[in-house]
Image (cartoon, grey):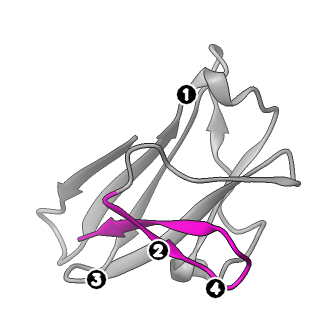
């Protein structure tokens, strides 16, 4: 799930990325164009119920491709992404539109 709130203090969007407990993972990292697909830059906070969350400040008027890396080995898309686009690895990336 993706929640977007426009920042009142700077020209950016506060975007909260959330994964439900059903992903059955111990760790989750958010990877995408905003961090050059770095697999360690944005670890997500694991909640008691097994869900994950992370909020980023992102530039407006942009589209960002992203995916979740679960347990350091399994890639997942966001089930509620704004769009999906093919990637060079034969799968798709999630897209958030701001």
- Please, what secondary structure does the residue beneath circle 4 have? loop
- Please, what secondary structure does the residue beneath circle 1 have? loop
Q: Is residue 45 magenta?
A: no
Q: Which residue is mark 1?
A: 20
Separation of marks 3 and 2 at Cα, in angstroms: 15 Å
Figure quadrant of the C terminus? bottom left
Q: Nearer the viewer, residue 6 or 21?
A: 21
Q: Is residue 84 magenta?
A: yes
Question: Which residue ends up furthest to the top in the rendered image?
Answer: 49
Q: Which residue is mark 3?
A: 62
- Mark 3, other Cα within 10 Å: few <14 / some 14–19 / many ≥20: few
Quarter occupied by residue 82? bottom left
Separation of marks 2 and 1 at Cα, in angstroms: 22 Å
Q: Earlier in the sequence, mark 3 or mark 4?
A: 4
- Residue 31 position in % (x across, y down): 64, 67
- Residue 35 position in % (x across, y down): 60, 80
Q: Which residue is mark 4?
A: 36
Q: Earlier in the sequence, mark 3 or mark 2?
A: 3
Q: Is residue 2 left or right of residue 93?
A: left
Q: Which residue is mark 2?
A: 85
């Amino acid at each position: 799930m993706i929640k977007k709130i426009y920042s009142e203090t700077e020209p950016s969007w506060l975007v909260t990325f959330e994964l439900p407990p059903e992903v059955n993972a111990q760790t989750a990292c958010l990877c995408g164009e905003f961090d050059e697909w770095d697999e360690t830059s944005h670890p997500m906070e694991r909640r008691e119920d097994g869900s994950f969350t992370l909020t980023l400040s992102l530039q407006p008027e942009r589209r960002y491709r992203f995916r979740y890396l679960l347990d350091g080995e399994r890639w997942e898309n966001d089930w509620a992404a704004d769009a999906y686009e093919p990637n060079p690895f034969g799968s798709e990336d999630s897209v958030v539109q701001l």
